[in-house]
Amino acid sequence: MKSLDLGCGPRSKLAGSVGLDMRPAPHVDVVHDLNDYPLPFPDDEFDHVEMSHVIEHVTRPLDLMAEVHRIARDGATVRIITPHYSSQLSYGDLEHFHHLGYITFLTLQGTGLFAIARHKLWFTDLYRWCGLAWVANRFPRRWEKYHAFAMPALYVEVILRVAKPGGRKSADLVRDYMY
């Protein structure tokens, strides 16, 4: 299984993966800006793409996801973790250009090019102990619509499965994305 850690950062990368980051570091295999397309990989190269605290930093997340779709094989997994839009962590970093939630990935799934295989909203201990985390994860759309800012999550994590049905291409993602 060939994996890619996009935006692996200065400290570590997913074990056994190719590490890409915009800044050189000992474990970075490819130095490249994620706002510069195309990414320096051939089509259908990876079985897994790791994106931990990356998507909120790029100027055009939809274009990045189109590139991820292009370089991932049909059926590949994409793990994304990002601060939830209700969290102060989302707004506290001046380099966070986008604020995402479960609805973001549900809408992405609507294109037919990605499917949510698993999701998790991460909360502080207080919200886990009182059962709110369980309710929010069971009904994520309702929680985001009615309760997110009153009882904020820390992060949203999704595992997406890449789908490449009937000749559809990565470029279709930008055309077909509709909120």
Image (tube, rainbow, N blue to C red):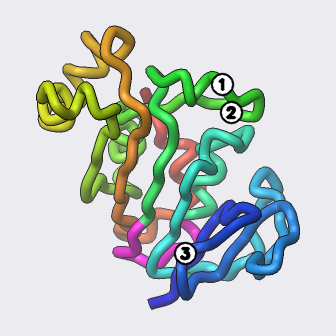
Q: Nearer the viewer, residue 57 or 46?
A: 57
| Residue carrying label 1 | 92
Task: Locate residue 43, reporting x and y percent.
Answer: 61, 79
Let me know if residue 50 is in the magenta part. Answer: no
- The answer to whether residue 119 is seen in the rendering is yes
User: In the rendered image of this protein, does residue 62 appear above or below residue 94?
Assistant: below
| Residue carrying label 2 | 96
What range is drawn magenta here? 69-77
| Residue carrying label 3 | 14
Task: Locate residue 173, reporting x and y percent.
Answer: 52, 50
What is the three-letter code of the residue carrying label 1?
Gly
CB contact under 8 Å: marks 2 and 1: yes
Q: Quadrant for the C terminus, please.
A: top left
> How many angstroms separate mark 2 from mark 1 (CA)?
8 Å
Q: Nearer the viewer, residue 132 or 141?
A: 132
- The answer to whether residue 38 is seen in the rendering is no
Q: Residues within 10 Å of mark 3 (few under 14, many from 20)?
A: some
Residue 28 vs residue 103: left or right? right
Q: Residues within 10 Å of mark 1 (few under 14, many from 20)?
A: few
What is the three-letter code of the residue carrying label 3?
Leu
Residue 16 vs residue 111: left or right? right
Which residue does the image show at 53% across and 52% down from the upper left? 172
Q: Main secondary structure of the magenta part?
A: strand
Which residue does the image show at 30% across and 21% down from the upper left? 144
User: In the rendered image of this protein, does residue 170 appear above or below residue 89?
Assistant: below
